[in-house]
């Protein structure tokens, strides 16, 4: 190494007087900031931003990038996150100037292609999910949940019903109760049954005319299908409760069954999961919602309408209004649209099919070492019970860190909460058998280490840019910006 | 049944089913009642080759008229600035695009350090101590700021909202308020300057004493004018409220930032700094605040720490605020944010540095001044006096809009936002013109000549 | 957990609070077992002096790195004193859970019927 660059920030590399852009030409008379900005407004202390040449900036970020695991490099078995391959053509199409240079306040007649793409994507998602109408506006899955709950609330209010409770299973993603609370609802927890599915009797005992919605993930967060889904929907509908499907695990169902056909009233999609748009190190996502016709009138405005090939924007009076300043994460929609075109009906059927096959195949190879709390077959993912590690003085987090030494990412850990020391593995359909075989070998090897040399696991990782990161110190000391001086 | 994105041959499939202990794929689905399974192919277009689908999507792109073909003076938070090539070069790297949220710190130091640097730059620009790791966009950042203000004031639910706030942002806040019980009280603008009316603030705070969670103001305001923020925190403190400021980060380069006035929560849109306008998404919402408000702050945040050998390291921290731990008591429901957009923004800010950004800001203001001077010659005046940044509302003669629009259509020009389409209480012929460094002198001359002739001929 | 410390002179709630009774004022903290389960404690959200509390409702919030736990009031009453030192040294609960009390409550009603003595609490662990 030329020099140890560990963690050195832009600010420490900065040298006053340098910059990475050239001066822009002046073709209009320059009058100067002193004339343009009265002294009372002028900024007194310049922000301490880095001062570097273009090459230094590029090298800084390229070096940072090499410290990331990413799907183009290796396996990413993060349960519930659906880390599948992101097709390259989607990236180049999303960069077309005909999309990137559009402004959200342009007149509709100048964005006909964009509106047509959105209109078509809405219908494709509607067909894939069995829902009657779709809004693409929510910018992420959690935003979709919140939007859907606002739609449900508006629906109930339109019928003169001020329902204030939302039922949520104890196995749910944290976003479900958080979204319900932000939308002004009271959350009531529904228990899981011993088989890992919803305890339908507990659900029924909590349903009533004050319950606005039941939010359920299907397949649920332990990777199994809610077999009694029809009964669940019927019980909810009997008291007017809307049934919401968290679409985080939709990948398992694509081409196999449709949420709309199962009885759900409303759901969200994660285009950044099921529809291969890249995760971007945390975002942007896109969290469209689909609804049955009785909820359509309440979807966020503006709505794209198609009048014989002429696309317009409408603002229905019954709409909840906008939930985003513009149309949502439009360039993510372009990517998802390209993906669906690439797949076609057979390709989409192959998604759910191979995702389910891969998960069950991988589990079959691993289960001799570690098993699930709930019985399979599983859908697209399975959740291992890591509690046997405790007897060896280890935790799931140790196991996860050690896995990363072998060039794969760790599974999702400590979720769902109903499985102790949980380790949630989702291979997705875009992994080859060879990768799954290799991962199973690695997994069993680490398990052997847990028994034979637990200290190796306890002190992992050993082969990554850093050793175990001290997250306790981070939480105690809270250094959230570069400490200048 | 093979597909280019799915590495599975029929032979492999058969062997894998065997290894799994079943004969047919359907045997893996006993949990799904047979009558609930889809018995037909999905009714979506047939699979297309990469060549064919690219042709289809290029055709859609070509049906749009983007800012490469149209000279546009639209702004309102989605501002077109020049983006150096290095930005897209970095942001296209799959190490950034195809990484997940950096939960496993040891395999995610690249994203983590980059976000830490982004947080630092946002806080520096806003003049505060800390920033989160991003929010969806400016409008939802405002909503998060309001939720946070409630938490900072023991769950007060009313707001004093500047009437000259971005009307799109206000609409989004309105959507949320339908369910969570928020009430908004309007703060008027002054008749001469379109600025915050201090008497109106005092009156709203006094009338709703003990109930207002936050005073919410915007600078530059929707008329494009810098607001004087001095003294606002004192008014808020006296009322037990917090100050939320929606602020344009580029304007903060030349004017004192909200943090310098003690604003508790600063929110807004970073899109102009490194991102194309993209029909408004993906954009980049920001939220900057102070350590004392950290536990009420929404969204992820990265902290600096060390590894087991004492080497500098970064990881997500203060996570007990977040939905995956705090569930219904979380400060926000946000999970996925706009991570990749912070890469673009970080690279842009690092390239520009303080001097480059100040220069861009000066370019924008100078070009607006050039337009203002040109329009004044035709008798077209700004709606309000005041100090504009890169955007300004101009009052065209009544009845001139149709003529202006027709002339602009012919010339391939979008002259700005017709404010009365989005806001009450503004004259119908008010147009909000946004200039940036990307507008050449001839673009500006074209705008001035069209507005002057069509608008001035009334 | 057999290794946890459970002093004989305190009462315990099944939700892992300890309670010291001194007339009509009770002192509340979390048990050694609880601190061990939570791991490194980084922050305590304390109630305010004068705040009214209800039996079984939240009194304080304990934050560890990746988990958070509510501390419940064992009786109705009013907070008369808080351990302000915890604001800067939440980790002292890990060091000595019984010295690091959280709040003192002047009670206005009966103690929770669920409180047990040391032997009873040990049986729960």
Image (cartoon, rainbow, N blue to C red):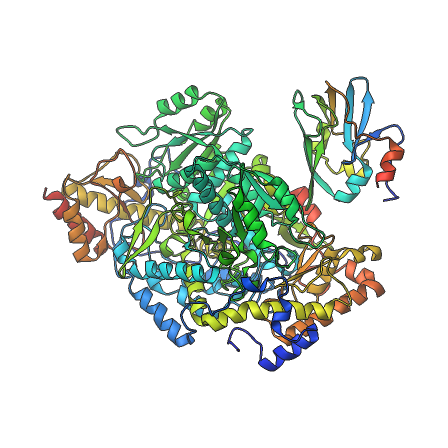
Q: Is residue A301 above or below residue A159?
A: below
> At which x and y percent is residue A47?
47, 44
Q: Is residue A318 above or below residue A28?
A: above
A92 or C55: which is nearer to us?
Answer: C55
B216 or B193: which is nearer to us?
Answer: B216
Instruction: Tell whether B345 sits left or right of C114.
Output: left
Instruction: Tell whether A41 sits left or right of B131.
Output: left
At x 73% / y 72%, what residue is drawn?
A441
Q: On the image, which quarter does residue B203 sit in?
A: top left
A179 or B448: which is nearer to us?
Answer: A179
Query: Which quadrant of the figure contains the N terminus of chain C?
Result: top right
> At which x and y percent is residue B440?
26, 56
Q: Is residue A410 above or below residue A436?
A: above
> At which x and y percent is residue A102?
33, 57
At x 34% / y 60%, what residue is drawn?
A114
Instruction: Tell whether A461 sits left or right of A242.
Output: right
Query: Which quadrant of the figure contains the C terminus of chain C?
Result: top right
Q: Is residue B62 visible?
A: yes
At x 60% / y 47%, what residue is drawn?
A174
Q: Is residue B120 visible?
A: no
């Amino acid at each position: 190494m030329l020099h140890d660059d560990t963690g050195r920030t832009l600010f420490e590399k900065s040298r006053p007087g340098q910059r990475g852009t050239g001066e822009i030409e002046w073709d209009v008379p320059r009058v100067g900031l002193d004339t343009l900005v009265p002294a009372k407004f002028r900024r007194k202390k310049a922000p301490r931003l880095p001062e570097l040449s273009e090459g230094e900036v590029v090298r800084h970020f390229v070096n940072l990038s090499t410290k990331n695991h990413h799907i183009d490099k290796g396996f990413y078995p993060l349960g519930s996150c659906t880390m599948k391959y992101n097709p390259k053509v989607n990236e180049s199409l999303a960069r077309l100037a005909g999309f990137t240079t559009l402004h959200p306040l342009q007149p509709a007649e100048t964005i006909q292609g964009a509106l047509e793409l959105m209109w078509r994507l809405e219908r494709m998602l509607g067909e894939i999910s069995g829902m009657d109408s779709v809004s693409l506006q929510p910018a992420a899955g959690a935003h979709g949940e919140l939007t859907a709950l606002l739609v449900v609330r508006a629906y109930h209010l339109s019928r003169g019903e001020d329902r204030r409770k939302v039922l949520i299973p104890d196995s749910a993603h944290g976003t479900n109760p958080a979204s319900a609370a932000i939308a002004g609802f009271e959350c009531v927890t529904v228990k899981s049954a011993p088989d890992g599915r919803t305890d339908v009797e507990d659900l029924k005992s909590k349903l009533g005319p004050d319950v606005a919605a039941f939010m359920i993930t299907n397949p649920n967060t332990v990777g199994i299908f809610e077999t009694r889904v029809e009964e669940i929907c019927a019980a909810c509908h009997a008291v007017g409760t809307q049934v919401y499907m968290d679409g985080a695990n939709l990948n398992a169902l694509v081409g196999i069954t449709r949420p709309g056909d199962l009885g759900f009233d409303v759901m969200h999609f994660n285009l950044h999961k099921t529809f291969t748009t890249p995760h971007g190190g945390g975002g942007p996502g896109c969290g469209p919602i689909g609804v049955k016709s009785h909820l359509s009138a309440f979807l966020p405005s503006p709505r794209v309408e198609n009048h014989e090939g002429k696309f317009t924007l409408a603002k229905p009076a019954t709409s909840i209004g906008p939930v985003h300043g513009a149309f949502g994460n439009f360039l993510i929609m372009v990517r998802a649209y390209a993906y669906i075109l690439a797949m076609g009906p057979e390709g989409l059927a192959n998604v759910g099919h191979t995702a389910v096959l891969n998960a069950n195949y991988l589990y079959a190879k691993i289960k001799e070492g570690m098993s699930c709390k709930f019985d399979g077959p599983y859908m697209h993912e399975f959740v291992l019970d890591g509690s046997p590690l405790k007897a060896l003085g280890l935790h799931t987090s140790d196991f996860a860190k050690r896995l990363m030494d072998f060039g794969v990412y760790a599974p999702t850990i400590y979720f769902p909460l109903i499985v102790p020391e949980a380790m949630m593995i989702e291979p997705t359909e875009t992994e080859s058998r060879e990768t799954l075989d290799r991962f199973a070998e690695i997994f069993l090897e680490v398990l052997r280490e847990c028994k034979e040399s637990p200290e190796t696991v306890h002190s992992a990782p050993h082969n990554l840019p850093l050793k175990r990161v001290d997250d306790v110190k981070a939480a105690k000391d809270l250094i959230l910006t570069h400490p200048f001086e | 049944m093979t597909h280019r994105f799915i590495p599975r041959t029929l032979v492999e499939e058969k062997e894998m089913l065997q290894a799994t202990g079943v004969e047919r794929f359907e045997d893996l689905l006993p949990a799904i009642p047979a009558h609930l399974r889809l018995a037909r192919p999905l009714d979506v277009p047939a699979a297309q080759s990469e060549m064919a689908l690219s042709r289809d999507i290029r055709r859609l792109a070509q049906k749009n008229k983007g800012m490469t073909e149209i000279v546009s003076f639209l702004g309102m938070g989605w501002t077109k600035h020049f983006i150096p090539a290095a930005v897209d070069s970095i942001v296209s790297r799959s190490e950034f695009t195809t990484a997940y949220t950096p939960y496993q710190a040891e395999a995610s130091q690249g994203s983590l350090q980059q976000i830490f640097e982004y947080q630092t730059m946002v806080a520096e620009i806003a003049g505060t101590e800390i920033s989160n790791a991003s929010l969806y966009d400016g409008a939802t950042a405002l909503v998060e700021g309001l939720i946070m203000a409630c938490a900072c004031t023991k769950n007060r639910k009313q707001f004093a909202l500047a009437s000259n706030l971005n009307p799109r942002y206000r609409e989004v806040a309105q959507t949320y308020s339908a369910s969570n019980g928020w009430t908004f009280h309007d703060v008027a603008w002054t008749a001469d300057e379109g600025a915050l009316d201090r008497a109106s603030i005092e009156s709203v705070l006094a009338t709703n004493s003990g109930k207002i969670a936050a005073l919410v103001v915007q600078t530059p305001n929707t008329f494009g004018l810098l607001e004087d923020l001095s003294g606002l925190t004192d008014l808020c403190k006296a009322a037990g409220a917090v100050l939320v400021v929606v602020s344009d980060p580029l304007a903060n380069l030349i004017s004192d930032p909200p943090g310098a006035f003690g604003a508790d929560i600063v929110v807004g849109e970073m899109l102009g700094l490194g991102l194309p306008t993209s029909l408004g998404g993906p954009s980049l919402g920001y939220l900057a605040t102070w350590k004392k408000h950290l536990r009420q702050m929404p969204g992820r945040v990265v902290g600096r720490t060390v590894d087991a050998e004492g080497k500098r390291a970064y990881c997500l921290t203060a996570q007990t605020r977040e939905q995956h731990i705090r569930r219904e008591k979380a400060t926000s429901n946000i999970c996925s944010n706009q991570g990749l957009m912070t890469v673009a923004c970080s690279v842009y800010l690092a390239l520009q540095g303080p001097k480059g950004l100040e220069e861009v800001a000066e370019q924008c203001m100078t070009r607006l001044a050039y337009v203002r001077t040109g329009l004044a010659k035709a008798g077209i005046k700004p709606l309000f006096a005041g100090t504009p940044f890169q955007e300004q509302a101009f009052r065209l003669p009544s009845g001139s809009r149709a003529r202006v629009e027709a002339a602009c259509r012919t010339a391939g020009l979008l002259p700005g936002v017709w404010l009365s389409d989005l806001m009450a209480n503004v004259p119908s012929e008010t147009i909000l013109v946004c200039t940036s460094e990307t507008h050449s002198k001839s673009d500006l001359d074209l705008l001035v000549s069209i507005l002057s002739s069509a608008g001035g001929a009334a | 957990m057999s290794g946890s410390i459970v002093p004989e002179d305190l009462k315990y709630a099944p939700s892992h609070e300890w309670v010291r009774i001194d007339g009509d004022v009770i002192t509340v903290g979390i048990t050694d077992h609880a601190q061990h389960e939570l791991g490194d404690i980084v922050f305590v959200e304390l109630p305010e002096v004068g705040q009214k509390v209800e039996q079984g409702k939240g009194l304080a919030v304990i934050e560890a790195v990746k988990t958070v736990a509510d501390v419940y009031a064992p009786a109705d009453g009013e907070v008369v004193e808080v351990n302000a030192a915890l604001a800067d040294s939440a980790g002292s609960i890990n060091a000595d859970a019984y010295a690091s009390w959280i709040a003192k409550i002047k009670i206005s009603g009966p103690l929770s019927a669920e409180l047990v003595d040391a032997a009873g609490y040990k049986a729960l662990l």
